[in-house]
Image (spheres, rainbow, N blue to C red):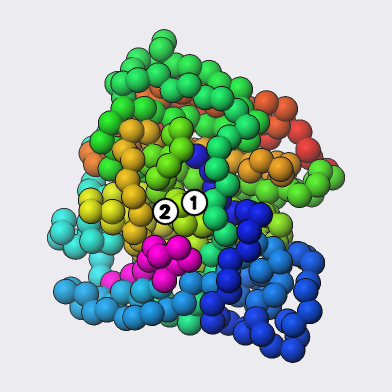
Amino acid sequence: MKLGAVAAVVLVVAFGFQAASSAADSAIEPCSDVTNLYAASGAQLAACGYSYAPLTSTTSLPDGGTSYNYALPGGQTTSILQPPAGFNPATASAAEDEAYGIPPAPSPQSAGYADWKALADGTTAPVNPRASLVVGDNPVSGSTSTPNPSSGGSSAAPDLTVNPSGDWSGYGQSGSGWTETWLAYYEPTLGTTHCSNPAVGFWDGIGGYPSGPLGQSGTVSGFDSGALHQLFYENVPAGPIFPGVTAPAGSQVISNVLYNGSNSWSYDMSVGGTNHYYSGTGSYSGGYTEAITEMPPGYSLMNFNEPVTMTSLVGRGFADMNPTNEYTMSGYDTVGGISSGTFTITHDSCSG
């Protein structure tokens, strides 16, 4: 259940924005802060644990949209989807919405209805078909904690297992056959920290426990490079994909992860009312779904200056998350009780 941003092995850099073989990149560079992943040199990115996914083809979609297709290291693929001009999630057909990973409307009385309405009423971001996408190296596997999820997705709150964790906080729900999960939160302001190697990620996902396939998306800051407030998505075992979209502090982020079947995934991500559509390939393990704040092993938790309230819903009809497990990042932050799918992560230490 890891946001795989770094690994010990640096993958071969494919053709990209700045050739890794250029004179400027020929010397081995130490990893240094990168505030813009798409302005850094290939050698600098490689030193920080990134590689490139090259654009391999462009496909016309049945509705008039376009799919820009990229090859990930290890054989998986990913696509950035551009809906046709005039596309409106709120008025599109159910089949069109599902093709772009847009969830159906939940009950107007549900905790997530206002967030769904913001997503459905949002504008569509124009796609910049980059020659390559920046991706992280192989995901970090395992956990510094030892969670023990109980069985049964319908477990009642009294059965909730509380697990102290070394690297993540939030909630997980076990069961079977999860195909969709949803998370809404406001990207926090990041503060200075005196702790080494600060990083933080906020995400929701399907699978990943105790290991194996995981589809997830959200935002991340830090991870060697210093890049801040970046959208990411990934299908483990491939590394995280950074499409070059920033979620400014204070903006609402909505992340919808959808498993379509046949190892096909869709991601509908909204930042401040603008929708971004992605898809990818990856294996499926639907026995767990989660909403997480993460500090990868080997890092300290990056300081965020205000509590982060996360609303997490599960299932195609978007019932409130009814978790079987609560995780608290011991010594770094705490997680508040969950109610109607909503809970709050509060930073407790490492503030500057």
The front one of 41 and 307 is 41
> Going 50% across and 62% down the picture, which residue do you hit?
241
* Picture residue at 57% right of the left edge, 59% below the top: 137
Q: Look at mark 2 in the image and give the residue it sits on.
A: 235
Q: Is residue 195 left or right of residue 86?
A: right
Secondary element under disc 1, as helix, strand or loop, is: strand
Q: Is residue 72 magenta?
A: yes
Mark 1 and mark 2 lie on one chain; the one further toward the N terminus is: 1
Q: State the CA–CA distance, disc 1 to disc 2.
A: 13 Å
Q: Is residue 98 visible?
A: yes
Mark drawn on residue 231: none
Q: Quadrant of residue 45?
A: bottom right
Give the residue at mark 1.
Answer: 218
In percent of width and height, residue 336 lies at 56, 25
**Where does the image place residue 34, in percent across and percent down from the top left?**
71, 67
Q: Whole-percent x and y of residue 254?
A: 43, 50
Is 97 placed left or right of 238 in the picture?
A: left
Is 12 left, or right, of 57 in this rendering? right
Q: Nearer the viewer, mark 1 or mark 2?
A: 2
Amino acid at pointer 2: Asn
Q: Is residue 263 magenta?
A: no
Question: What are the residue bounds of the magenta stretch?
Answer: 71-84
